[in-house]
Image (cartoon, rainbow, N blue to C red):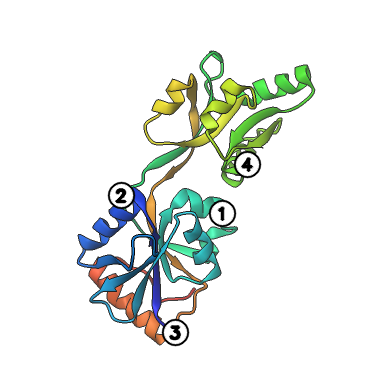
Amino acid sequence: MTLRLGVPSKGRLQEQSFAWFAARGVRLARTGAEREYSGRIDGLAGAELVLLSAAEIPRELAAGRIHLGVTGTDLVRETIPAWDAAVQEVAPLGFGHADLVLAVPDFWVDVTSVDDLDAVAAAFRARHGFRLRIATKYHVLVRDFLRERGVADYQLADSQGATEGTVRNGTAEAIADITSTGETLRANHLRILEDGLILRSQATLFRARLAEWDAAACAALSALSARLGVSAGEGGG
C-alpha cells in the first residue's frame, strides 16, 4: 500500500509545512491546476501527498485513510475521541502556535482565576435562573478542563464565528478560544484568566495507528522517518 501523507491544502499552514519538509530534504509539491488538491513527494518511493483542510486531517487520520498528517494538536484533541489510541504525535513542527484560553470581560475585576469564575458562575445561576454561558468552538477540551477544576454552573454556547464578539453581543458571559497574540481579545475588552490556559497548540506531524500498515507502507515510513530525522514507530499500534 502507498503511504499517504496529509498536509493542509492552502494558506500559510501549507507553505510552512512544505518549508518544514524541504528543510529536511523532503520536497512536497502541488500537481495539477491551482484548485486541484493533489500533490507529490519527490524522491520517496511508495508515498503520495494528499492535500486536505486542516480540519479534515484529524478525521482522516482517525479513520486510517491517511497514514501521516500535519494538523494542530487542538484539532486532534478536540475531534478524535481517545485521540492517543488513534494517533501518535511524531514531531512538533514549530509553527502554527496558538493557545486555547479561558477569558472573561475586563470589568470583572475580581475574577482572575478559574476558582473565581466558579464562584461567579454559581452566583450568576442563583441570580438569573440559568447557567453562565461560555462561548467556544472547543466543547470537548473546555468541558474536560472545567470538570477537572470542579466548575459546574455553566453552559457552553456553540460559536463557529467571531467568538471574541459574543460577550459584547450579549450571547455569552465568557469565552474559550484560540489566541496567538491576545490582540483580538484585548480589542474586545477580554482578559485571560491567570490559570486559564487550556492547551498550547501547534502544527504537529501525526501518525495514524489504525491505518493499514503493510510492508510497503512500513518501508516508506522508515525511509521518510530517516530523512526527516524523526521516530515514527513501526506502523500500526
Total marks in image: 4
Tell me if I can see residue 122 in this picture: yes
Say the numbered circle drawn on residue 193: none
Label 4 residue SS: helix
Q: Please name the amino acid that badge 3 sits on.
A: Asp
Classed neighbour count for the residue bearing mark 1: other residues with Cα under 10 Å, few (<14), some (14–19), many (≥20):
some
Label 3 residue SS: loop
Image quadrant in which you'd find residue 153: top right
CA gap between label 1 and label 3 equals 27 Å
Q: Position of residue 110 (x, y in %)?
A: 56, 14
Label 3–label 2 contact, CB within 8 A: no
CA gap between label 1 and label 4 equals 13 Å
Q: Which residue is mark 2?
A: 94
CA gap between label 1 and label 2 equals 22 Å
Say the numbered circle drawn on residue 143: 4
Label 2 residue SS: loop
Say the numbered circle drawn on residue 79: 1
Q: Which residue is mark 3?
A: 214
Q: Please name the amino acid that badge 4 sits on.
A: Arg
Taking the spot 55% from the left edge, 50% from the top edge, the residue there is 78
Q: Please name the amino acid that badge 2 sits on.
A: Gly
Q: Position of residue 230 (x, y in %)?
A: 29, 65
CA gap between label 3 and label 4 equals 38 Å
